[in-house]
Amino acid sequence: MILQRYIVSEIFKPTVAILVVLIAIFASYCAVTYLAEAVGGLLAPDTIGLLILLKIGMALEVLLPTTFYLATIIALGRLYQDSEMTAFAACGVGMGGVLKPVFVLALPVALVAGASSLYIRPEAYEKIYRVRDQAQNEFDISRLSSDHFLEMQSGKFVFFAEDVQDKAQGAQQVFIRVAEGDQRQVITAQGMTQVQSDPAGRRMLRFRDGTFVQFPLNAQGGRVTRFERAEYPLPTEERSESRYRRKAAPTESLIGSERLEDIAEMQWRLSTPLSTLLLALLGVPLSQSNPRRGKFAKLGLAIVIFAFYYQLFVIAKTWVEKGVVPPLPGIWWVPALLAGLTVVLLWRTGEVFYRKPG
């Protein structure tokens, strides 16, 4: 019992440290990305903090398994480095004596990771989509930056202005490109201001002294119109139900669905706690190292295995979505491979380090 508490303590400390570092790195990356979008006018600055928190919530399903996996390897690797594992084996402590505390600590981590995958991530996706859509639908001309291109709706709308002042004074020397299906529209104007709304409630852009060009993408011909005054509705982000359906769909709505995309998404969510446990157990044999080689001797190999495992999961999910692989075995062959590798490595490690003295 004392030994088990000792191993739990040794793993818990690097788990917390690694998780804090990974969250800090991830949050910093998100902050830089969202700040750049805010500067470009794509986001309201007061939404950045909320978006970062939501992104962290989404990432927990990956960060938690990764953190515990690395922490197990680092903590047990130190025990090998200090010859404590050799002492445990000499005292008759078998593989089970090491696996048990690892599993006991991994179980609550797996439950939290599973809750994140099943409930937190979908809710976070839904809120992020709503915040981003609202930010684009509340577009304000004052968010534009002079001499910078601004893309909206994945490049469907492109804005450029040489001189941007404020909402009242507008922008000068304006270029706008609009892509709608196979039609393209280009507006150039000496000036542009934002109008609150038209009778239909749409927010409008009012142009002065410009040209309106409309042409088909894959055909000849087009139409050029010169104007002194013209108005054009501001683009609004229309929610794509297909985009929302899977990532932001409540888990309850996926249960029983016969759509291959829903089945793949549900299997992905359910696999998270299983992957957490398997990776934790895999960390035990991967932590084995010769004291002369250092406690992080196999850390590089462990990272490669994790990256390969995650990539296989992505491929397996895509195969299920496209019908290449039926719902059974679905994506479950990937954790089955990991389980087989874990069993083999545990057996080999036990043979070498955990023989009872005799």
Image (tube, rainbow, N blue to C red):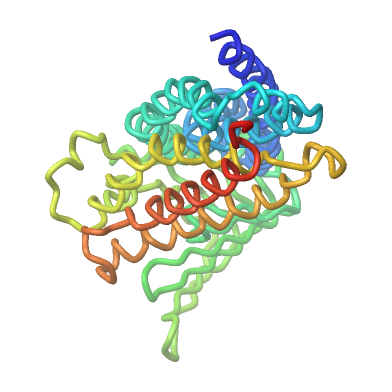
Location of the C terminus (image quadrant): top right
Please say if 277 is above or below 90: below
The reply to whether residue 239 is in sight is no
* x, y percent for residue 176: 57, 60
- The residue depicted at 64 percent of the width and 20 percent of the height is 16
Front in this rendered view, residue 281 or 318: 281
Q: Residue furthest right?
A: 292
* x, y percent for residue 82: 81, 27
Q: Quadrant of residue 134?
A: top left
Q: Residue furthest front?
A: 358
Front in this rendered view, residue 174 or 183: 183
* x, y percent for residue 318: 37, 62
Q: Quadrant of residue 98?
A: top right
- The residue depicted at 54 percent of the width and 64 percent of the height is 177
Front in this rendered view, residue 286 or 120: 286
Please say if 224 is above or below 45: below
Specify whether 24 is left or right of 340: right
Q: Quadrant of residue 349?
A: top right
Q: Residue furthest bottom?
A: 220
